[in-house]
Image (spheres, grey):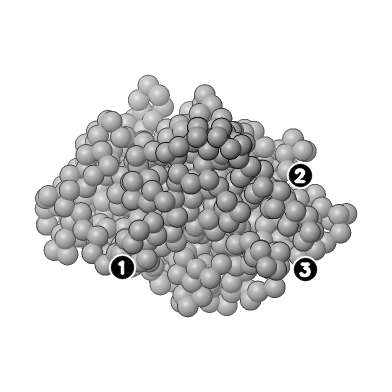
Amino acid sequence: MFGRSKTTLRLSTLTVAGVLASAAAASIVVLPGVASAACVGTGTAIDVATLTIPTIATALGAPVAWASGYQGQGIDVAVIDTGINAVPGLASAGKVVDAVDLSFDAPSTSVRYRDVHGHGTNMAGIIAGDGTGGATTVGIAPKARIINVKVGAGDGSVDASQVIAALDWVVQNKTTNGRNVRVINLSYDTDALTDYRTDPLSLAVENAWKAGIVVVVSGGNEGRTAPGLGNPARNPFIIAVGGSTWDSTRLRFKVEKWSSVGDGIRNPDVVAPGDQVASLRVPGSYLDTAYPAARVYDPLTCTSMFRGSGTSQAAAATSGAAALLVQQRPTATPDQIKALLTSTAYALGMPAAQQGNGMIDLAAAIGAATPNTTQSFPASSGSGTLENARGTFHVGTSANDLLTGEYQAFKSKFTASTWATSSKAKTAWTNQTYDSAGRLATGTWSGSSWSGSTWSGSSWSGSTWSGSSWSGSTWSGSSWSGSSWSGSTWSGSSWSGSSWSGSSWSGVGWR
């Protein structure tokens, strides 16, 4: 089903093969003694195994949308991640709007809102790179605006409660201060096996969806032996994304082995390229320092980038695609945008548990009629426990000092029933104040006071979280027990000490 006639605006197998080959060739042409010398110290040259963002955009059919005038103008994409930096590719004035920093970095003014980890900027480049770093930094929706919602600290640490608070904040503030948030990118999951109908994190994404925001979530990187998608991708309302890779032998895409499979009932909705994707780099960040072999560059421009794999990258590509469709159809509901993407996707000849409806085909979606559809799954109550939503991932400095149970990162007790009622009513955040730049300065979430300059959460469950230092990119006393760092790749699938769960935040590998 990969090859289709041009009348359906789908890309044929030969066309895609030619695009990938020519794009790769264009990226690795080196003038001896010129480009190679100029790029010394920026990593290794992009090779044919690397997918650049423009290559992904072409494979997904984005140029058809661009040619029709849809490049994401007027659409804001909230990126809930580790922060975003205005590196080349996101350097246009007003391209990135700092909104809120709910991370453990927030007390430090030097890194507040900034991406000390490297993941968030990498995702933002795929979604909406503006080309200020050269042709390889043009994202899927290059004229969309990025709303920076930081939850992950410099070492990647984040608690599920921070992600839930961030989702609530976006829902309540999607149109404040001139924003027009129509898409949320959440390249994050936990390994929780909870029922979506009770899970609090699941309810948070569902509430955002029902508030008119297309929520795109990575499906997870646990592979074909996974018991199902990660949390909150298990929620059937939202768009869960699997990762695909280019098969140079068969000259077509296939679902990558590391992409989490569904359980036959809740499968990925779509897949998008996520293997060895070169996107924007944050020099000196945690990932940049930990994985120097992941640094790559375009020899024609010397643009330095960072290469990684995972459903994080695939979700970011899908968020960019959603932004283009929302711009084209500003009155379309999230259900309709999802139906457009799923009904026009093309099958890769793999089981539905792996590929869902297949790989995104924007060329077909742009030309299709808007479906008249409304999803009717059972709603989530959010009445389950926060602890179960975390799965096995906890933040803390030692086994005796972890954030566990029904305590959230803002110190207070988390009462699911009370929070769920306010979240559904879009009142989970109260007493909000903003600074002169329109960024959240203070507020109360689910009964807990929060300030960008101080963290009130000094103790959880009666245990003082002493010994943790959130200064810049270091966390003195952090434990990485259970994770294995070998050369340029990360051989583990989880961080047991502190987590932006390794299967989601760090991707499958940075190489």
Name the kind of residue labelled 1 in the image: Thr
Could you tell me residue 206's position as x and y percent?
50, 57
Q: Which mark is residue 64?
A: 2
Compared across the picture, whether 166 is left or right of 143 comes to left
Name the kind of residue labelled 3 in the image: Met
Circle 3 residue: 1
Q: Residue at x 50, y 32 (%)?
A: 38
Q: Secondary structure at mark 3?
A: loop
Compared across the picture, whether 82 is left or right of 396 comes to right
Task: Locate residue 444: give its quadrant.
Answer: top left
Name the kind of residue labelled 2 in the image: Val
**Mark in front: 1 vs 2:** 2
Q: Which mark is residue 392?
A: 1
CA gap, disc 3 and disc 2: 20 Å
Q: Residue at x 64, y 65 (%)?
A: 247
Could you tell me residue 310's position as x and y percent?
49, 59
Q: Earlier in the sequence, mark 3 or mark 1?
A: 3
Give the crowd class for mark 2: few <14, some 14-19, many >=20 residues within 10 Å.
Answer: many
Image quadrant containing the C terminus: bottom left
Q: Secondary structure at mark 2?
A: helix
CA gap, disc 1 and disc 2: 43 Å
